[in-house]
Image (tube, rainbow, N blue to C red):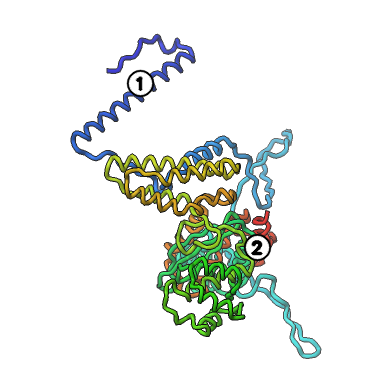
């Protein structure tokens, strides 16, 4: 039984004596807890029972940023919230006091602010003047700006915001609108969501072009997406200032290069294209054929395919596939010809289709490979724990270097990387994995030359989560317009959020439903990326 030293009456103790007593008691309780835990482990060992599994929360699979996240949470706790100021104009409403005696003195007002919302259905009938001119022509007064059909801009803004930003299902959205008193069907809601959205699609594409022209880096990722009942893939591209989604039927490198053209359909043979072909080990004879022919620019895929047929490249059956490598090179040449990704770094999770140009790898995904290794012996468990701790330590030093680059630290970090990933642990599977990670040395250490790039693809994973939610909510898209509108509006929602722009205000400005002016998003993205 735990023996405590005799203490006088607690009411007679000073604050310092009470504090010392509490600390002593806590230390004894902690010692007892450790002793009980050790006894429980010993009993489990003697009985042959398995110990408590070490399960990490799904949201933090690697633990690499645990300390940093804890520090950020503590900083947020220290900051006090200031007074909240409404973004909308404040309406003044005077509330009178009843039964005031005649000899009372008025002492002004006491303010009390209440935020509220007014949602109501409205049906407007515009009586448009009609005039018959002397020459026989009839003139009808035009409808107000933003009115193009029998549904007003405020209704369209509400539907677009609820469906894309609020991720509302179609049946619930229709039920909500009908509950508000609107006479509207599911088909009419679908038309509002998908029809005549070319301006939004064009703006999202211009946002991508601005990002690819001016960004120092982009991070990329992809996820599954169904279209017309078939499995496809949604690719995400973006950085801290913009996001762009595109759903296609493939996740090949040719598909990714095609997306990097940002809406252009051309192919180009230039220095960048031929350099790409040489790096991908295309036969010298094949490259010589392409160089000797004067044709350098091709308007679309049909023209490019015809060129390959003319040169006799399409019929070659060798490895690597000359058609595939030549096509990838011509696509990369088109990307370079349009000025996209000049000296920009592509950060990915090591999926092969993203390994293009200046490439960097996500450290969280690299460490996750070690984290997922199965261990069955004490030696393997100890080796895995040791390597993971060394990786976390190295990762934290890389983050510190990115904040304050130093040439001397750069050389030291390169040497540490070699020591870490060339080590022999005695756990053969882990040793092979470390050797494979060491082979990715240039991509994992890209931050030493480009300290502005992130060490992970968390931004891409956060962005693409809205596509995953939309897939769970709606399943598949049925028309090409529906697919394009889903990608477009989710891109615009994410881009507005990163730029600090209200998506509600953005829709209001584009649909003519609000007085708030939102400049073209591509101009803001270009300025932010260039700055």
Q: Give the structural element (helix, strand or loop) at label 1.
A: helix
148 to the left or right of 318: right
What numbered label is drawn on residue 370? none
259 to the left or right of 26: right
Q: Residues within 10 Å of mark 2 (few under 14, many from 20)?
A: many
Q: Position of residue 445 (x, y in %)?
A: 52, 50
Viewer-side residue, 63 vs 485: 63
Q: Is residue 82 above or below residue 489?
A: above
Q: Residue furthest bottom?
A: 136
Q: Which residue is mark 1?
A: 28
What numbered label is drawn on residue 522? 2
On the rendered image, what quadrant is the N terminus found in? top left
Q: Earlier in the sequence, mark 1 or mark 2?
A: 1
Residue 472: name its quadrant.
Answer: bottom left
Q: Is residue 182 visible?
A: no
Q: Is residue 264 visible?
A: yes
438 to the left or right of 275: left
Residue at 57% x, 45% y is 402
Viewer-side residue, 60 vs 473: 60
Viewer-side residue, 444 vs 62: 444
Q: Is residue 523 above or below residue 34?
A: below
Q: Give the structural element (helix, strand or loop) at label 2.
A: helix
Q: Position of residue 26 (x, y in %)?
A: 39, 22
Q: Position of residue 248 (x, y in %)?
A: 48, 70
Residue 522: name its quadrant.
Answer: bottom right
């Amino acid at each position: 039984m735990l023996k405590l030293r005799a203490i006088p009456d607690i009411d007679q103790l000073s604050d310092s004596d009470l504090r010392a007593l509490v600390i002593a008691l806590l230390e004894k309780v902690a010692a007892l807890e450790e002793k009980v835990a050790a006894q429980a482990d010993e009993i489990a060992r003697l009985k042959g029972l398995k110990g408590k599994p070490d399960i990490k929360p799904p949201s933090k699979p690697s633990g690499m940023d645990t300390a940093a996240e804890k520090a950020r949470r503590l900083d947020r706790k220290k900051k006090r919230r200031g007074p909240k100021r409404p973004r909308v104009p404040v309406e003044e409403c005077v509330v009178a006091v009843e039964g005031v005696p005649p000899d009372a003195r008025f002492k002004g007002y006491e303010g009390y602010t209440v935020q509220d919302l007014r949602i109501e259905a409205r049906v407007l009938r515009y009586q448009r003047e009609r005039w018959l001119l002397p020459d026989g022509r009839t003139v009808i007064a035009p409808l107000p700006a933003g009115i193009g059909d029998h549904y007003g801009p405020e209704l369209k803004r509400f539907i677009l915001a609820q469906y894309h930003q609020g991720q509302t299902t179609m049946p619930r959205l229709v039920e909500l609108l009908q509950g508000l008193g609107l006479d509207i069907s599911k088909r009419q809601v679908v038309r509002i969501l998908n029809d005549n959205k070319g301006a939004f699609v064009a703006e999202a594409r211009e946002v991508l072009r601005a990002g690819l022209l001016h960004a120092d880096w982009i991070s990329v990722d992809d996820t599954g997406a169904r279209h017309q009942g078939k499995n496809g893939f949604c690719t995400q591209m973006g950085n801290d200032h913009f996001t762009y989604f595109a759903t296609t039927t493939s996740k090949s490198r040719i598909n990714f290069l095609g997306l990097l053209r940002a809406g252009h359909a051309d192919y180009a043979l230039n220095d960048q294209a031929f350099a790409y072909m040489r790096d991908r080990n295309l036969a010298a004879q094949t490259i010589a054929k392409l160089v000797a022919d004067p044709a350098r620019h091709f308007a679309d895929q049909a023209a490019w395919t015809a060129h390959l047929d003319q040169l006799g490249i399409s019929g070659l059956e060798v490895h690597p596939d000359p058609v595939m490598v030549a096509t990838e090179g011509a696509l990369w040449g088109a990307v370079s010809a349009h000025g996209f990704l000049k000296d920009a770094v592509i950060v990915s999770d090591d999926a092969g289709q993203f390994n293009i140009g200046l490439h960097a790898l996500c450290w969280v995904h690299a460490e996750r490979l070690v984290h997922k290794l199965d261990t069955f012996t004490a030696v393997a468990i100890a080796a895995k724990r040791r390597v993971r701790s060394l990786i976390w330590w190295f990762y934290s030093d890389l983050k510190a270097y990115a904040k304050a680059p130093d040439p001397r630290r750069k050389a030291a970090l390169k040497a540490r990387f070699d020591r870490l990933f060339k080590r022999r642990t005695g756990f053969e599977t882990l040793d092979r994995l470390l050797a494979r990670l060491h082979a990715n040395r240039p991509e994992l250490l890209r931050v030493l030359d480009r300290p502005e790039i992130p060490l992970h693809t968390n931004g891409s994973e956060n962005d693409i989560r809205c596509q995953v939610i939309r897939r769970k909510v709606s399943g598949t898209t049925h028309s090409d317009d529906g697919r394009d509108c889903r990608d477009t509006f989710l891109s615009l929602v994410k881009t507005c959020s990163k730029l600090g722009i209200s998506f509600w205000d953005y829709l209001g400005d584009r649909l003519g439903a609000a007085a708030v002016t939102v400049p073209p998003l591509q101009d803001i993205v270009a300025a932010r990326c260039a700055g």
